[in-house]
C-alpha cells in the first residue's frame, strides 16, 4: 500500500522510501532523516536504513559458515571471528586476547581495575584514573555524605536533585510521557527504556552471541558470561561473582546480617530492593507496573514480563543457537544447553559422566588406589 508525503503529496511504495524523500527534500535541522515509525532522527540515509531494520526485522548479511544472519555488515564481520578464532584485541596487562574492543574494556575494568583506576574512594569504593578526579568526586558526592533523606522510606541521597527525582515515586508525579501510549513516568530514564518496548529497539548487541539489550549496563554484565570472569570472591566460601553488590548480598547469607529495616513493622531484610518491594506490596498495596494486555498489575517490571510471556505472548525470545529450539525463559534455555548440548566426559572405570574434562581427570585419581 503506497504512503503519501504530507508535505508535497508525492506517493511512495514503502515507508523507507518516504523517509529518504523527506530527508532529501524537506530536511530540517542537522538530523533531517526522520523515522516515520518512531521519533528517531538521523544525520544520514545509511543511518536511517540501518535503524529501519529494527522495525522490519530485516537481516540481510548472512554468515557462510553457520548461516546466522545480521542487520549490519560490521556485526557479521565481528561474528566471523568466532569461526576464524581471530582475537585482535590483546590485554597489555595479562596477554589475554579478545574478539572486540568492548570485551577487552570490560575485562580491564573488572579484572585490572586497580591498575586502570588506582585511586579509590574510601567512602563508596569508586575508583578513578587520577587523584584530581577522585578529589572532585569526594567534594561533589560525599560532601555532607548522603545528608538528604526521604521522609517516606528513609533512603538517603548525596544530592538534593537525586532526592527530588526519588520523591516522585512516592508523590505519584509523572512528568515524562511516552511518545506512543498514555503511560507516564517519574524519571526520564524510565521513559526512554519503556519507549524501546514500542520501537523494539535494542541498541546494544553482544558481539559473541548477538543477543541484544536495551541498556549498556545489561550488555556489560552479559559479556562476563562469555569471558567467564567472576572477579568478586566471597572470603567465606569458594563462590565468586560478576558484581560486587551481588557478592556483598551473598556474604550476608553467611553472616545473617539484615541491615534494612521496615519502619512500619520492623521486619528486617538483607537487600534494600527486597525492603522496597515489601513496603510497596505489604503496606501500601501499590503495584505500579501494569500488564499492557490485561488488568493485572505488579510490583516489579520483571514480574510483569514473566506474566506477559506466560499468558499473552506466543513469542519465545530465547533461541538455542545449536538446534534453534526456542524457550520462554533464559533459565530454560540454559538448562536445555546443559542437558542436550554439553559434551560429557565418561569415566571408563565406573561410567560416571562429567561436563568438564578437568573434573573427569580429578575423578580418575579416586580409582588409582583400587
Image: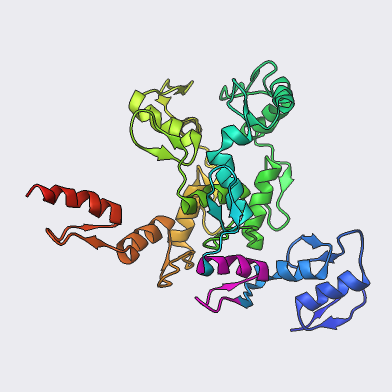
Residue 355 location, x and y as percent?
29, 57
Residue 354 location, x and y as percent?
25, 56
Residue at x-position 53% and y-position 38%? 286
Q: Residue furthest top?
A: 144
Please provide the residue range marked out in magenta.
62-83
Residue 144 location, x and y as percent?
68, 15
Which of these two is toward me, 103 or 36? 103
Counting every numbered tag in the picture gives 0
Which of these two is toward me, 333 or 285? 333
Residue at x-position 84% and y-position 82%? 11
For residue 117, which quarter of the picture? top right
Residue 293 location, x and y as percent?
54, 59
For residue 215, above or below residue 249: below
For residue 100, which quarter of the picture? bottom right
Q: Residue 313 colored magenta?
A: no
For residue 257, which quarter of the picture? top left
Q: In the rendered view of the protein, which quadrant contains the N terminus?
A: bottom right
Residue at x-position 18% and y-position 59%? 347
Q: Residue 82 colored magenta?
A: yes
Residue 281 visible here? no
Residue 244 visible here? yes
Q: In this view, does 231 lie to the left or right of 342?
A: right
Colour scheme of this structure image? rainbow
Which of these two is toward me, 43 or 351? 351
Q: In this view, does 267 lie to the left or right of 6?
A: left
Amino acid at each position: 500500500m503506497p504512503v503519501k508525503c504530507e508535505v508535497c503529496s508525492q506517493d511512495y511504495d514503502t515507508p523507507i522510501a518516504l523517509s529518504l524523500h523527506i530527508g532529501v527534500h524537506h530536511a530540517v535541522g542537522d538530523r533531517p532523516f526522520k523515522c516515520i515509525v518512531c521519533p528517531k532522527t538521523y544525520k544520514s540515509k545509511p543511518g536511517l536504513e540501518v535503524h529501519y531494520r529494527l522495525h522490519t526485522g530485516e537481516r540481510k548479511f548472512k554468515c557462510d559458515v553457520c548461516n546466522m544472519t545480521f542487520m549490519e555488515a560490521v556485526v557479521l564481520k565481528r561474528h566471523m571471528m568466532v569461526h576464524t578464532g581471530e582475537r585482535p584485541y590483546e590485554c597489555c596487562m595479562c596477554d589475554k586476547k579478545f574478539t572486540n574492543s568492548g570485551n577487552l574494556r570490560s575485562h580491564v575494568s573488572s579484572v585490572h581495575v586497580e591498575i586502570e583506576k588506582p585511586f579509590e574512594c574510601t567512602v563508596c569504593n569508586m575508583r578513578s584514573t587520577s587523584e584530581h578526579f577522585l578529589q572532585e568526586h569526594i567534594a561533589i558526592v560525599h560532601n555532607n555524605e548522603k545528608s538528604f533523606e526521604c521522609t517516606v522510606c528513609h533512603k538517603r541521597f548525596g544530592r538534593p536533585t537525586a532526592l527530588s527525582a526519588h520523591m516522585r515515586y512516592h508523590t505519584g508525579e509523572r512528568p515524562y510521557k511516552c511518545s506512543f501510549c498514555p503511560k507516564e513516568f517519574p524519571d526520564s530514564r524510565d521513559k526512554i527504556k519503556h519507549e524501546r518496548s514500542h520501537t523494539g529497539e535494542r541498541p546494544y548487541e553482544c558481539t559473541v552471541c548477538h543477543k541484544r539489550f536495551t541498556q549498556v549496563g545489561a550488555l556489560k554484565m552479559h559479556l562476563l558470561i562469555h569471558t567467564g570472569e567472576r572477579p568478586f570472591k566471597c572470603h567465606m566460601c569458594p563462590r565468586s561473582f560478576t558484581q560486587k553488590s551481588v557478592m556483598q548480598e551473598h556474604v550476608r547469607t553467611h553472616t545473617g546480617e539484615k541491615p534494612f529495616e521496615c519502619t512500619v513493622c520492623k521486619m528486617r531484610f538483607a537487600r534494600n530492593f527486597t525492603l522496597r518491594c515489601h513496603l510497596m506490596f505489604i503496606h501500601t498495596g501499590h503495584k505500579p507496573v501494569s500488564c499492557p494486555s490485561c488488568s493485572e498489575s505488579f510490583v516489579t517490571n520483571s514480574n510483569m514480563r514473566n506474566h506477559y510471556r506466560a499468558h499473552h505472548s506466543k513469542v519465545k525470545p530465547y533461541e538455542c543457537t545449536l538446534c534453534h529450539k526456542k524457550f520462554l525463559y533464559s533459565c530454560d534455555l540454559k538448562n536445555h544447553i546443559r542437558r542436550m548440548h554439553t559434551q560429557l566426559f565418561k569415566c571408563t572405570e565406573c561410567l560416571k559422566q562429567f561436563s568438564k574434562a578437568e573434573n573427569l581427570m580429578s575423578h580418575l585419581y579416586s580409582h588409582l588406589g583400587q
